[in-house]
Amino acid sequence: MLAKSTLLACALAAPFFAPALLKAGNRDHALAGHSMKAREVSQKLAEFDSGAVALRQTLGRLETLTRTKKSNWTSHALALVEARSHINGLGRTLAELEALRPYAGEFENKAIAEARPRLVRIAAEVESKIRALNQDSRIVVRPHYRQSALSLYGQSEDLVRTVDTILGYKNARLRLKALELRAQPPSGDGA
């Protein structure tokens, strides 16, 4: 009889407790979704960082070509087109990161915000060089072009350094927090 009344009580109470259980399940599901998005932010930032390093290497090659007196306009054109390809990829990744900003931490948001103006400035300069080269292939020996092409490497270095510094600071803070947690004495009732 006791088992029957317990079963009946559970059946009658279920409609009152089910919404609370579902809410808790939804909250856990939402937290898991947020955690997945936060991981995606970290992965996309790593992808952005790798792309920025590749852009810096390409612009480093352009810098070398600019310093070399015997380089021709086709070498410059190839390096600039490759740089534009890297920039387009970085722009796509940055757009995805900007869409994920609600899931990003403080330092990740700062890296995303700092990357945009630097990438825009580099993109405008690369496009300007491509247009100038299309109009006159002899421009590669002119001082204004040479100076501007040399500055592109510095701008790409600034982009990489800024993102790396912010993410490095975030990682250092996470390591410090982990060390602090390990250094805390185990909690117990001390009895």
Image: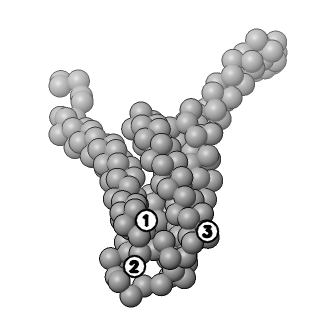
Front residue of this view, candidates 188 and 28: 28
Q: Are marks 2 and 3 in contact (CB under 8 Å)?
A: no
Front residue of this view, candidates 60 and 67: 67
On the image, the x and y values in percent for residue 112 come to 48, 42
Front residue of this view, candidates 84 and 147: 147
Check residue 53 in the rendering and tell me which mark sits there, or answer none.
none
- In the shown orientation, is residue 184 left or right of residue 99? left
Whether residue 50 can be seen here: no
- Tell me how far mark 2 sits from mark 3, CA to CA: 19 Å
Asked where in the image residue 99 lies, by quadrant, the reply is top right
Give the residue number, with chain letter if any, for mark 2. 65
Check residue 145 in the rendering and tell me which mark sits there, or answer none.
1
- Tell me how far mark 1 sits from mark 2, CA to CA: 12 Å
Q: Residue at x 58, y 40 (%)?
A: 98
Tell me the kind of residue under disc 2. Leu
Give the residue number, with chain letter if any, for mark 3. 135
Asked where in the image residue 69 lies, by quadrant, the reply is bottom left
Q: Compared to 159, does 126 lie above or below?
A: below
The N terminus appears in which quarter of the rendering? top right
On the image, the x and y values in percent for residue 31 come to 58, 33
